[in-house]
Structure formats: structure tokens, C-alpha cells
Image: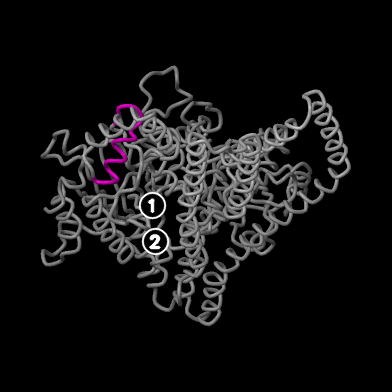
Amino acid sequence: MTTAPARPPLVRSSDRVIAGVCAGLANHLGWPVRMVRIGMAVAALAGGAGVAFYAWLWIMVPTADENARRTARRPASPIAPAVSFPDTPGVADLSDAPGMPGAPGTSGTPTKAAPGSWRSKVSGMPFGKEILLGAGLLLAAGILIARLVGVDVPLGTLIPVAAILGGAAIAWMQLDETRRAGLVDKTKADQAGGWARLAAGLALVVAGVLVMVSGSGSWEQTWLALLASVAVLGGVALVLLPWGLKFWRDLETERAGRVRATERAEIAAHLHDSVLQTLALIQRRAANEHDVIRLARAQERELRGWLYRDSDKESGQLSDGIKAAAAEVEDALGNAVEVVSVGDCAMTQRHEALVQASREAMLNAARHGGGAVSVYLEVTDAAAEVFVKDRGPGFDPDSVPPDRLGVRESIIGRMNRHGGTAAITSSPDGTEVRLRLPIAAASAGTAAAAANNANGEAKP
Amino acid sequence: MQRNPVQGSPAPIRVVIVDDHAIFRSGLKADLDPDIVVAGEAGTVEEAIAVIAVQRPDVVLLDVHLPGGRGGGGREVLAGSAPLLGTTRFLALSVSDAAEDVVSVIRAGARGYVTKTISGAEISGAVRRVAGGDAVFSPRLAGFVLDAFGTAPADIADDELDKLSARELEVMRLIARGYSYKEVAKGLFISIKTVETHVSAVLRKLQLSSRHELTRWAAERRLL
């Protein structure tokens, strides 16, 4: 990746005959697939070299899916996922509010540095592993050739030594990996893999030692020695177990403590940046009731968004847009705007128009209604509907002078242009604006429009 | 919200306020209308259960988040006062908008839910309504109900516990839009009594339904 940026990564292709190795290799090297396949077949005839090469690549090269998963696996902040995304829309709006100092954004910085350094480390590692393996294979090939030529190679000792080295390498590699990943992502799968690797390493080492030792004596002796050593090891383990357990437990507590401390620090940073600042402002402006209410409202909204955010929920939804518009109106005019939403969908260009019209309706409701504004968003399979209600004295929609663009253009006109409808009912008890936007464009009732209504009415 | 002219009724409504913030308790006490008498206060789960058992109030104003007990908060108070649920009604009060907080106290037996930011007159109205045996739905609770039960009406009668009828859906939608019961009645051309019947029916369904969708909805929000 870092060495040859122009090349696509070496991954096994899904366009496969056996395991997708040839297609992947061809894609990586930029050669025609047919050539690579023929070359591989010819090499297979040359003493099975092609088969070995193919098998090696099959084992070592990940499929495209695996590769994608491996690179995309890292969460932004593994320790405290709830506090790692401070830049919610609510926060962004808060900083726009007059008299509100810097919105919290500091908690993002420490987490940003981590993934970069991790990736740079890991990009070096797999190549190192592969080069090591390649060197081992070359060595084996050299020994085989030497034997063919006639040189006497002491295979009896070399193979067990190689096994011991290999086993130790596997076990140590794992230690290195856990240290590198730290305590951040000890998922179940990783642990299982770690255990398997440890077992494999242990088996290799024990087998190597056994072969080496048994070379000098009979099997019976070896068996006895093995039994004795297992007994000794068992005794030692029995004695050391309490210490080991205690050490392990201490380590776990310390680890948990560190995680808690990090979380606390994040929360403290957030509270300091937001709530404490607002409280200070409120004390300074205690005389101005309007400002105090607005500050408290904005801070409440921000804290609520931070505390009760659904971390599973994806952002960029329609309800987020409506809530952001409500927050804007609250900040601008100081009236409470309560948003209740049922159902949700992803924002599209047409929904943007719905949000703008809702915003205009909320502004009107806050300006002329005076009190709190109720906003209800309902998204069903058929349509997205927004209701904006106030409890003001009401007005006659037909008597609005033609030069007043607010209602006529920004609400009704905008909705009509995007294939929706707007209705206004007003009585002395209050006014309600009802906006309705069908999911698919009414004129283009085809499947294409339903499948992708983002492009359907991009430009009116 | 609604100003039921029951001020003239002879017996005042006795309430117990359960909230761990003393400032909030005293503020609420000052805000309540004069026909509502505060018979007791409590700040923890254990205190609340004891005070409610002794005072046997008409209505308990119950904060969702409470210290003490086994960490269950308002739900635990409801569980501890289960034998009194027939005579004492619970109205949940919370600063939390989280669905799990709201729906879990309702399912534990509370007759309604309001946010702490509403005015004293509105809380007094809600207390009277709950004391009268009706349910109190805030727009947000109505939103949760619509989210949980879905917005499609029931078509057959036998799953009546699991879905809302067309009329109940209409009532819930209007409440979610910020309508008071009176406005709902006017908008649907029915009496306030009928609105109250519908809302109580919805509350019963919310408390009793074991519907698959509701369970899944709750599980997604870690309610069950």
C-alpha cells in the first residue's frame, strides 16, 4: 500500500476459478488474467512449483471482503464511544448563538491522533511477516537443493530447531500484537484467535523439543522424561498460581480504572466546555430574563443531545434536520420548540425543502404565536409529514397581503414546487401548519423514482 | 393544558412528591394549585415506599430517576407500592426524554408522564386528571406510543391489545402534534370524555401488550 500506491491492493478476486488467486494477482500486477493463469499452470508442471505458489498465495492473501473489513475495523474512540463524537448539529448551532463562547470540540483531538499511528505501524507489519516466511521457504529450498547436490545436511537437528523457532515466533508474535492493540479492542474473536495461536506455538515447540530429545534415547525414556517434566511443571504451576491470579486481577482492576478515568476526563471536559460556561454566562446576565431562558434552553438541548444520543442511530436523518431547524429557531427567538418525531428516513434534496419550509413555519409560529411551539414529524412509507402548531391569537391565511412572502412563497410555494402540499388552519386558539411530502415524486410514479428519489427532483 | 373547573370540589387532592432534589420539591409545592395538598415528600426509593404506604395519597408525583433501592428508580417505587395501585395513582415526572425511562415507568403502572419543564398550572391539571382515573399523555409520550405500535391501524379485532384502533391513532397523533384533550375533542368532533376513554385504552394497551413489535421496539431501546 505504502510502497506501490498506484497498484490496487493484492486481494483474492471474487471472479474466481479455484480461489481467485490468479485474477487477484493479475489485477494487482496489471497483467492479463489469461496470461497469469497459463503461467501458473505451466509452473505447476515444473515439479509442482506452481501448485505450491498458488497454495501459498491462497493462504496468505485475503479476499477483498476480508481486506475491507480489516482496514475498516477501527472505531474512532474505542474506550468511550459515547463521548467521541462531540460535533453534533446541536453543538454546532450553539456556537452560532450570540454570546455563546466556543462550543465543545476539544474532546475530539486526543482520539484523532490514535488511528494514524496505529495504521502506520500495522502497514509495516504484514510485509515483515511475509518476508520472514519467504526467507524460511528459501532456506528450505536451499537445503533441499543442497541435499540433491549431495551435501549432507543434518536434517535430524534442523527440523526440530526450526519447529521450536517457529512455535516461539508464533507465540511471541501474539504478545506483540496484544501489546500493540493494547486494551482497546479485546473482542471475543481476537481472543479465540490468540488462544489458537498460543496452542499452535506450544504444540510446535513441544514437538520440536521431543524430537530433539528422543533422537538421543529410546521412546520409553522420552516418555518417562515427559511425564516427569509435566509433573514438575504442574507442581510449579500449583505454587505460582495464586501469585499469577493476583497479578492478573491487579492488572484487570488497573485497566478498568484507567478506562473509567479516561471516561471521567472526557465527561469533565465536556461539562467544562458547555455547562460551566453557560452557568457563568447566566450569572452574568441574571438581569435579562430573556437571555437567561434562551441560554438555559440552548444548554439543555445540547446536554440532552449529548446524554441521550443513540449511538447506533446514523446521522443525517430527516429528524436531525428538523431538530436542527427547531434549535435554530429557539436560539433566534427564545421560544421553546418541542419536536416529537415518529419514524425517520435519510435526508434527500427534497427533504431539504421540507426542512426549510418547516423552519419558516416554526419562525412564524414563534414570532406570532408568542409561546411554545409544538412540532410533530411523522415519516411513513407513503410520505413525510410535519405539523407546526402554536397557541397564538391566530390569523386569516387569506388576508395575508400578497407582498408578504413568508407564508406564500417559503412555505406553500416551496412545498408545491417539490411535489408536496401545505395547509394552514388558524383559529383564535392557535395556528397549525401542515406540510406533507410524498416519498416518491407524484408525477414520476415509476420504480426508478421510488428507488432513488434523491436525484428524482434535484432541481425544480 | 386543560383547566377542569373542579376547584369547587369539597375534598382536596392529596399528593406525595417523590423527587431527590429538595429545590425542585419545594418549587413544585409552591406551584401547585391550592386544591392540591402535599401530604408528604420523599427523596429516595425506600422513603417513597414508606411515605406512600402511610399517607395513601390520591396521586404520587414520581420522579423517574431516584437514588436508593436497587437502582431501579421510579419503577421500583411502583413495584413496592403495587398493592396500592388501585387507589393511589402515579404520575411520572422526568427531565429525561429517553424512551426507556418514560415507557418503563408507564409499563410499571404509572398513569401518565409529563416533563419537569411544564408550568404549575399544567401539572395541577395533570394531577387532577390522573386523580380522576384518566391518563395523561404528553406529546412526547404519544410519539413513543406511535413509534412503538406503528402508525398503521388494526384491521382485525382479535389483536386489539397489540395494535391501536384507527380512532386511537388519530387521538395519539393529535396529542403528539401538541393538541390538548379539549382541542382533540373539537378536532375529531367527539366529547372530551370519549377522548379520555381512548387515551385510557391506549395506556392499557401500552401497559399490557406483549406484542412482538412492542417487545422488539423495547428491546432495541434496552427497555426489557
Could you tell whether A299 is left or right of A378 in the image?
right
Three-letter amino acid code of the residue under disc 1:
Ser
Could you tell whether B5 is left or right of A240 in the image?
left
Res. A382 image quadrant: top left
**Residue A75 coordinates in the image, percent (x, y):** 48, 52
In the rendered view, tell whether residue B46 sits above or below residue A356: above
Residue that numbered label 2 is attached to? A89
Membership of A23 in magenta stretch:
yes
Q: Judging from the image, what secondary structure is the residue with disc 1 in?
A: loop
Three-letter amino acid code of the residue under disc 2:
Pro
User: Residue visible at 72% across and 51% down?
Assistant: A252
Indicate the quadrant containing the N terminus of chain A: top left, top right, bottom left or bottom right.
bottom left
Q: Which residues are magenta?
A: A16-30
Residue A230 seen in the current view? yes
Q: Pick the residue in front: A375 or A212.
A: A212
Q: Pick the residue in front: A356 or B91.
A: A356
Question: Residue A124: which disc?
Answer: none
Q: Pick the residue in front: A278 or B137.
A: A278
Q: Pick the residue in front: A409 or A325.
A: A325
